[in-house]
Amino acid sequence: MSSKNLVERETWTGKLGFILACIGSAIGLGNIWMFPWRLGQFGGAAFLIPYLLFVFLLGTTGLMGEFAFGRSQQRGPIGAFEKVFKEKNIPFGAIIGSIPVAAIGGIFTFYSVVVGWVLKYFSLAVLGAFHHMDIDSAFESFAGHPESIFWNILAILITLSIVIFGIKQGIEKVNKIMMPSLFIIFILLMVRSLSLPGSIEGVNYLLLPDWSYLLKPITWIMALGQAFFTVSLGGGAMLVLGSYLRKDEDIPSSAIQTAFFDTSAAFLAAFIIIPAAFAFHLDVSAGPPLLFITMPHIFTKLSGGTFFGIAFFLCIIFAAISTEVALMEVIVEAFMDRLGFSRKKGVIAAACIGIVFGIPLDLNMSLFGKFADFITIYLLPLSALLAAIAFFWIYGIERAQAEVNQGALRPLGKWWGFFAKYIFVFVAAIVLVLGIIYGGI
Ligand code: PHE
Ligand code: NA
């Protein structure tokens, strides 16, 4: 038996705390190092059509489902799956509910590696080191080598030092500082980037639509995978944040606001990075080179570059740490709810998992890539699908919709239940299948 009912479950102080935590979980590396590149690569403004469609129709539906699933069961994924499966006499609920926890554990592990790189580059920015170093070779001689273990552990310790304080005093508090700061600094950086001569080329790259891309399946696949990942669907983080929600909070509006701010952050990131790269005739590639090679080059060429470099990496730290805390909370909740751990023991256990699994990734970049792909292409979409089936089908769409609507200022009509049960679940299955076929979402 777990100690689930012995201590009262913590709740958010109110709507703002919850929404900011959701936005904090959503805005992350997906917005900063995946979105700008994909937007440019897959037809510019043409990519926005499937992307916005998927985020605002499917993403919000998935979010409402996960928030409501967590709130209705007052448990993280393992407990929530177990409860709804048991009710219908379906076995293995807890085991299936462990899949989302494993997926989140996997994201937490590789995310912490990247946050380590970001911390290192933030410190280089603070030291003004970009001016004196060989930027092109520095990343390769750092990532994949023992030094990165130190930064990985530091990233995990920072996350631990927040999550240990719990929902109100930990996760809520940091998001209340980090999220508004992130937007203010991002807007400042965007103004600076767009004021550079030649930056208009980058704006064109992002916005001139190449409609032919809408005829290519890969555009739609990329948009779909990006949409699910960016709003944090996966039966884990959003479900757990929802499990600390009171019954009178408005789930539909929370989901829409999360999607809106996540999209805004993605746009800001794109309009910071791409125009600046074009202004200095630099390569706009994806992933590590963009953040750790292209951007540092920009900061050596830009007047005020040291200041803007610090601001830029600070923003990435805010975006990534606010995601990290939500990820760690999923693991900690599982330890507390299932094994009766105290929060303190839970965060230590979660940190150990992140470190033990992270070290091999620190030391081997190709392993890192394979691991991240496995989690984001297979395990996370599978988890999102399982959560949708468990809630919309097994718990039952009528009760699911009633839970979504409870506390809503404008309750959703019957059409929503139909959409969630059939269309959303169908598309979630497609994300998984296409990801497997194309091997890269
Ligand atoms: N939404 C996060 C990002 O864009 C990633 C994430 C996915 C976080 C799933 C939690 C769960 O970086
Ligand atoms: Na995101």
Image (spheres, rainbow, N blue to C red):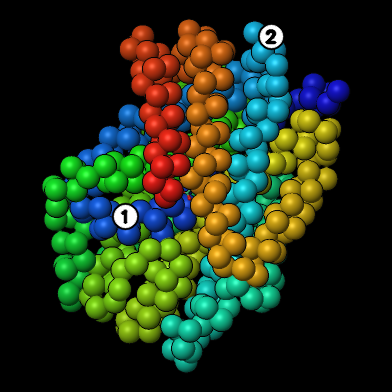
Location of residue 403 in the rendering, given as x and y in whole percent from the top left corner: 52, 15
Q: Which residue is mark 1?
A: 38
Give the side of residue 207 with respect to residue 164, left or right: left
What amino acid type is highlighted by mark number 2? Asn
User: At numbered mark 2, what does the secondary structure look like: helix, strand or loop?
Assistant: loop
Q: Quadrant of residue 186?
A: bottom left
Q: Does 33 appear above or below 409?
A: below
Give the side of residue 90 with respect to residue 435, left or right: right
Determine crowd level at label 1: few under 14, some 14-19, many 20+ residues with C-alpha closer than 10 A: many
Q: Which quadrant is the N terminus positioned in? A: top right
- Cβ atoms at labels 1 and 2 below 8 Å apart: no
Give the side of residue 1 with respect to residue 141, left or right: right
Q: Does 81 appear above or below 52?
A: above
Q: How many marks?
A: 2
The residue that appears at 74% across and 48% down in the rendered structure is: 350
Q: Is residue 99 visible?
A: yes
User: At numbered mark 1, what does the secondary structure look like: helix, strand or loop?
Assistant: helix
Location of residue 417 in the rendering, given as x and y in whole percent from the top left corner: 40, 13
Nearer-the-camera pick, 289 or 177: 289
Nearer-the-camera pick, 388 or 127: 388
The residue that appears at 50% across and 29% down in the rendered structure is: 385
Q: Farthest residue toward the bottom?
A: 132
What amino acid type is highlighted by mark number 1? Arg
Q: Which residue is mark 2?
A: 89
Q: Quadrant of residue 426?
A: top left
